[in-house]
Image (spheres, helix red, strand yellow):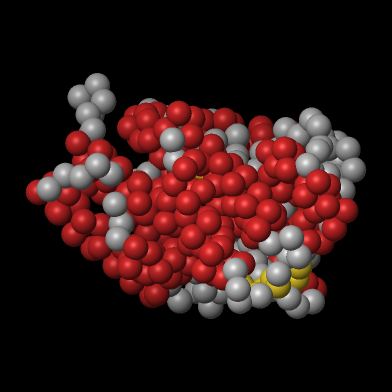
Amino acid sequence: MSTSTNRHDLWAPEARANPLPVYARMRQEAPLVRLFDPYYKVPIWMATRYKDAVELIRDPRFTKDMRKLPDSSPSKQLRSGESDVFNQHMLSVDPPDHTRLRTLVSKAFTPRRVEELRPRITAISHRLLDAVQTSGSMDLLDAYAFPLPVTVIAEMLGVPQEDQDQFREWTNIVINPPLDGDLQNVRKAGMQFAQYFQGMMAKRRAEPRDDLLSALLAVEEQGDRLSPMELTSMLFLLLVAGHETTVNLIGNGVWALLNHPEQLERLRANPALIESAVEEMLRFRGPVETSTQRWATQELEFRGQVIPAGETVVASLLAADHDPEHFAEPERFDIAREPNRHIAFGFGIHFCLGAPLARLEGTIAINLLLERMPRLRFAEDPARLRWRDGILVNGLQRLPVAF
């Protein structure tokens, strides 16, 4: 068995700014590399080649359900206390529970339902740009990339606008736990989130509205419903995934365009390329760096490595999407790349349910931004920009632009 190592230190500041060289070394070394997670202080196995990432994601010997791990498992001991409220949604269970939960929420994200949101997404985008149009500069994330998708998903769920910043704070704490291992704030954020939605659920039971929360409370599919814990957990997932993905799709996408002015001008000259451009943004610097965690249900062998029972495995979606075995010239940013079968939204049964919504928000937001701000440019040296900690979410902490 390979020993844990952080000679490929994905958590180092320089790797957070650009993890691609680290992933290139990992792809060359082995199909599966064993690292040490400095957040949870446990070993973590990572697949970085495209074909291995896809196989790992769909291998039924790995579970998404922490409840299936022995109580002695370090991962279970570390996470059970602070994150019970987050671990009964469709990304944290296996079939048949996964099938049941996904079916109950999938109707809100059909292509037809998502397309019906186009006018509202367009109106919100224009309103946000109106607010900054005369200022000459902004932090693209705070002024545009964050409020757009969080407003959309909050409106879908029925969350009041004045509470949206609070959700950003809670989700940042949960997604980026502290390196020092003190999880007190994570537990507190989880508890506050649960209490907030329990209060909202009580209001919706008494007075249902035309929103997704009321629909989830009322839904009945083949005699099945969401339990209170499942509903709270699902609301957390929908809120986090419903804005985090798009925030970083827009932020990373604009960052990539500004770093590649010839591609930016190409898109300005031909806005019809926006859908292809968004796919390349997703591949080149996707908003989700790694898959969510899976665990070995028993000692098993995968790609020549023996993985002990209960140990954590993840697939690097970003590394897979830069695998030269699958993509020609993967380090080249090409908004008309074809074919472009990236896995930025995952793969298989856990493929991102909100992918159509994220794509629509990204295409509208970026096209309108370029249309209304023809002189868009970095407001400071892009080499000085800081990226977020952790290896799950891939995004900038801020993106100052001038126009």
Residue 14 to residue 35: above or below: below
Location of residue 58 by image quarter:
top right
Quadrant of the image containing the C terminus: bottom right
Residue at 78%, 42% in the rendered image: 270
Residue 9 to residue 2: above or below: below
Residue 334, x across and y down, in percent: 83, 44
Residue 46, x across and y down, in percent: 68, 49
**In this orientation, which residue lies closer to the viewer: 108 or 315?**
108
Residue 96, x across and y down, in percent: 38, 28
In-image side of 272 versus 151 (left or right): right
Residue at 76%, 65% in the rendered image: 375
Residue at 87%, 48% in the rendered image: 332
Farthest residue in the top direction? Answer: 222
- The total number of labels drawn is 0
Q: Is residue 67 visible?
A: no
In-image side of 323 versus 91 (left or right): right
Residue at 41%, 40% in the rendered image: 90
Residue 333, x across and y down, in percent: 83, 49
In-image side of 26 versus 3 (left or right): right
